[in-house]
Image (spheres, helix red, strand yellow):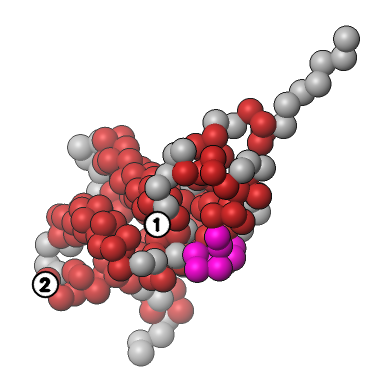
Amino acid sequence: MAVVEKSPMQTEHGRDRILRVAANLFLTKGYAETSLRTIADAAEMRPASIYHHFDSKDALLSEILDIGMHAVTTAFTAAREELGSEATGRQQLQAHVAGHLRALFANQAFTAAHVTVFPFAPADVRAASVPQRDEYEALWTDMLSHIAPGLGSDALRLTRLALFGAMNSAVQWFDHTEGSVDDLAATIVDTLWHGLAPRTGGTS
């Protein structure tokens, strides 16, 4: 008897399948434009099956945002734990930038949701996700204030925002299958740490 191999869609757990399919649809089609029926069709299941796992589309998005934030927070913690006590400030910064980028691309549909979907999410979904986002930002603020103690609070906030902008926007233009995430991390950190003037010889 021939053995018929099941497709990844068939073997994937129902809840995980719904989350993965929904995250990709929210990212590519938009949250408002994606219905539960659309998700069910793409996941090859009946719409009623989604309600077995999630009360609503908003609840589904909330969990997707939670998964994305958990991924980058875990990466931050891992980078901090792997650093030796002799790590320089620049080494600390690059380890955390590289960790953030790896988490972004390894969990892209979930992490990118915070960049492209979060601004358009219902108010209550955004409000529920804010505490996690604030906690993650606080980790970066603490790290940056440790390696650059001379920065005032305003400069520290702007530096963190600029860094997040550089990292998070990469999901929209950087092809991690053709380029090195570590090289991208090094470029971001070099630009932030040294600036452009020393490389070009410019003074303005």
Residue at 38% of width from left, 70% of height from top? 119
Work out whether residue 108 or residue 27 is closer to the camera in this orientation and state it: 27
Q: Which residue lies furthest to the bottom in this view?
A: 204
Residue 200 x %, y %: 46, 79
Name above or below for residue 128 compared with residue 201: above
Decide which of 125, 182 is in the foreground and name it: 125
Above or below 131: residue 83: above
Q: Nearer the viewer, mark 2 or mark 1?
A: 1
Mark 2, secondary structure of its residue? loop
The quarter of the displayed image where residue 189 is located: bottom left
| Residue 190 percent coordinates (x, y) | 39, 63
Crowd rating for badge 2 (residues with CA inside 10 Å; few <14, some 14–19, many 20+): few
Q: Which residue was labeled with disc 1?
A: 58
- The residue lying furthest to the top in this view is 1
Left/right placement of residue 16 relative to residue 86 reads right
Sequence-wise, the earlier of marks 2 and 1 is 1
176 vs 121: above or below: above
Magenta-colored span: 27-35
Q: x, y percentage for residue 22?
A: 53, 52
Q: In which quadrant will I find the N terminus?
A: top right
Residue 38, quarter of picture: bottom right
Q: Distance between the residues labelled 2 and 1?
A: 39 Å
Q: Main secondary structure of the magenta part?
A: loop
Residue at 19% in and 69% down: 156
Q: Which x, y percent locates residue 55?
A: 40, 47
> What number is the disc on residue 132?
none
Left or right side of 10 for 52: left
Q: Which amino acid does label 2 sit on?
A: Gly
Residue at disc 1, secondary structure: helix
Can you identify the residue that label 2 sits on? Answer: 152
**Quadrant of the drawing holding the C terminus:** bottom left
